[in-house]
Image (cartoon, grey):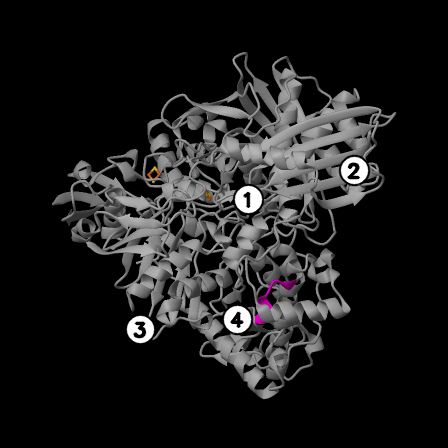
Amino acid sequence: MVRFTVNTTPITLDVPQDKPLLWVLREDLGLLGPKYGCGVAQCGACRVLLNGESVPSCMTFAADVEGAEVVTIEGLAAPDGTLTAVQQAWIDEQVPQCGFCQPGFIIAATALLESNPAPTDAEIDDSITNICRCGTYPRIRRAIHRAAATLAGN
Amino acid sequence: MPRLLSRRGFLITGAVLSGTVAVAATAGVGYLATVDIDGPDGFVDGEVGVLNAFVAIYTDGTVTVSVPKVEMGQGIHTGIAMLVAEELDIPFDDNISVEHPTEILPVYGGWASQLGIRPEEASGPLHWLGRRALGAVSLVSTGASSSTYELWTQLRQAGAASRHMLMGAAAERLGVPVSELTTPGDGTVFHAATGTRLSYGSLALAAATVPPPAAPALKPATDWRLIGRPQPRVDIPAKVRGRPVFGMDVVLPRMLHAAIRQAPVSGAAVARVANEAELRDLPGVVDVVVVDGHSVAVVADSWWTAEQALWQADIAWTPTEWDDLSGAELARRMEAALDSGEPNVVHDEGDPFPDAPGRLVEAAYSAPLVTHACMEPMNATVLVRGDGTAEAWVSTQSPTSARWGVFRGAEAAGTRPDDVIVNVTQNGGAFGRRLELDVVQQAAYLAARHPDRPVKLLWSREEDIGRGIYRSHARARLRAALGEDGLPLAYEALVAGQSVAQGMMGRLLPITGGGSPEGDFLTSEGLESPHYAIRSQYVGSYHVPSNIRVGLWRSNGFSHNVFFAESFFDECAHAAGSDPLDYRRRLLADSPRLRAVLDRAAAMAGWDRPLPPGRGRGIAIGGAYYSVVAQVVEVSVAADGEITVDRVFCAVDVGTVVNPNQVVAQMEGSILWGLTTALMSANTVENGAIVETNFHDFPVQRLRNAPRIAVEIVASDALPGGAGETGVIPVAAALGNAIFAATGRRLRSLPLAITESVGERRTRSVLRTEDA
Ligand code: FES
Ligand code: FES
């Protein structure tokens, strides 16, 4: 038995303790925003917020989330659908191409801005290690700066 | 629950199909007469007026465009919506959506690109034959950068015809002549004399039965409101919410999950699964299957369960003739082919290469196998019913290829190709990889064993990188005889690689072993330099087979051959003591279009401004898919060989631009794709198998390796060209040329650098000290 909250909903589940959170979310909870891209904490497509920290859910296990708060891409927008500054910046900069990697990037950027509200390019480059095969990196940098500016109120 | 393909998609296309069948029944004069190349007449289906094969308008005013083009990141659904909205005269907003139809009508067939032309360039018999013959085959795919140029006229005509029908319906309702009506561009028909305004939604059903015009007039370019102006992508709002359904996200009632292990040595068969009984006893495991003799799959109640079971599987493979094959041996075989002196001649123009050239420049180059590593690993969901009918949900570039895959996999269950419906989902990257049907066939094989239960097969990343399909490797020898002015009088390029056409044809078409490997244009494309003013040009190729499966890969042979050729012409420039830009300008004396693009890139980069020591700038140009791209790459090389790509300047001429925003995005993506391959990624062969397994040993660029990129579009009113691949072509050579400028070292083997770890998921690139 594992108890945690996902996108503010309390969950109690009977799953193996060693089942990766990614597959708990996708298979047991029907949350398909986090993606499988590598399974070995390399690509970041599966990233979720675990108590506010961006973690690869493919290498986070059911046992690790007992009592924790998990937020997936589906849980970022407000209940009325209003997007976060990061999501809006992603639209304004027209970031996604295929979009498969983007939930992981948006989660990583959200966590980055939480801990560093005004990151430099170098700080963005060093802290966001996700992979995008479509090549949206230049727009991701721009979108993070834009979101930072929005959050700073200018 | 995720939203699968909407009911609308099924409804429209199902209805359209019956429309086609009706035409066939009344015509009744042989098979070709049943090929309804212009699509069905309009009809009403509940709350929707289906105006033609492409456009349906709902009574609430929403517009659905039905086109079998796959959204795989390239933004084509936005381009499609723009072309229709432009001529239909509606605002570009979320009232218009694009759906991939489930039924493939002949009118959807991309016949022109199969003939190697653009539709507007065909006339008379060729036009008729293309539409009839290739329309009848109805091969539908998204690739070869062709979507925009294939659909450019057809979709604008569909929009214009629909607008004409709406105006006809309004004229009828108002009892006024059509000539008194206008469409102000807000989704209404307006009668100025009475001030009456009728919404498209209120006219939709009546419009469906108005006869379409034979040749709808298209707006002149001066009247365009949308085409050529950046429009936001229609798919992005859902993508930032994590909502789109990729193949991997398909969820169906009673669905089973499957994972697979394919033979490490491609071609080996499963000898036995020693612990099969044990695997079957694992909780959640439903089935353990040898698929087609060559792979082992576990079917379970969860993918995680299936994949975990396979980690424990004790599989023995049969020996093959390839078991000792190494990359070094393959390189040796390619060199032996190049030594043999009897190439397949693919281009021969002008005098033979001189026996005693005045100034000879010679160089040898190579490029490795490299896979696509689409962000979404390969997967397919297939349902085979007890009666043999089947349905598939796939992130595929080609529903016709997927249909064939289902047939092959489920043939034993009595499934025929016509019994298969393919639902195309969003593609999480494709790059040529998703034209293949391997994973679909495997999923169908599994589904046929579990009738009436959908089976979703997902490959692990390890299967994708280590047991997949690869861009061919290649080794090439180039030489040129320089004249008095330093420009080549004669140019000769020989390349050895593995034929992509041969492998692909056998895998994808209803014939076995099809496709001649000899002189395969995919091996040599990009070595010919028709735009350069060189009187004698000779290009030949050699096919060197192996058990590794090679396939289409974003820009195919161009990706390595333009690296070879444009590096080589840089070497010629230096041998002649010329500036590489100036040298190319002289070579492009007769190619003003390319020269303008080259000049733009050079101007963007400030080519004449010197760089400090340790930094360098390289330039290269490439033309393909009716488009031209020139790039300047700027690098810094440290004393220890660490290379940083600082900036890339890109000028592009894609003819008439539909959505500039997307052309720029495709250039950015292509540059990063090309740089990744030029600097980092390679697949290697040991003991007949691919060595790399995941992103830790198949490195790709991440944010910290990505340069600043500037893109400028060179304005043109020519017919549209492709934007998805041309940007890949010059970048490797521009990089190599920049490294030469920075260091004086000419690197001739891809990848140019060795990737070193500098922390978790963080790497740096250090230049190779010797050629591979
Ligand atoms: S799937 Fe978790 S990091 Fe790639
Ligand atoms: S948008 Fe396709 S992988 Fe990033």
User: Which circle's residue, 1 or 3, is located before the other in the chain?
Assistant: 3
In contact (CB < 8 Å): disc 1 and disc 3: no
Q: Amino acid at mark 2?
A: Tyr
Instruction: Residue B507: tell me if it is visible.
Output: yes
User: For the residues marked 1 and 4, what is the alpha-carbon distance in whole angstroms?
Assistant: 49 Å
Q: Amino acid at mark 1?
A: Pro
Quadrant of the rendered image containing residue B752: top right
Q: Which mark is residue B386?
A: 3
**Which residue bears the numbered disc 4?**
B56
Give yes or no for residue B622 being in the magenta stretch.
no
Look at the image and tell me in which quarter the C terminus of chain B lies: top right
Judge left or right: residue B451 versus residue B520: left
> Considering only order in the chain, which callout, 4 or 2, is on the residue closer to the N terminus?
4
Label located before the other in sequence (2 or 3):
3
Q: Which residue is mark 1?
A: B545
Residue linked to disc 2: B532
Name the amino acid type tagged 4: Ala
Majority secondary structure of the magenta segment?
helix
**Which label's residue is closer to the chain start, 4 or 3?**
4
Quadrant of residue B115 within the rendered picture? bottom right
Going by the image, does B354 lie left or right of A8?
A: right
The chain carrying label 3 is: B
**Mark 2 Cα within 10 Å, few/some/many (few <14, many 20+)?**
some
Viewer-proximal residue, B667 or B157?
A: B667
Give the image location of residue B263, x and y in percent.
37, 46
Badge 4 sits on which subunit? Answer: B
Which corner quadrant holds the N terminus of chain B? bottom left
Q: Nearer the viewer, mark 4 or mark 3?
A: 3
The residue sitting at the left extreme is A1
- Disc 2 to disc 4: CB gap under 8 Å: no
Tell me residue B247's x, y (percent).
39, 55
Which of discs 1 and 3 lies nearer the camera? The answer is: 1
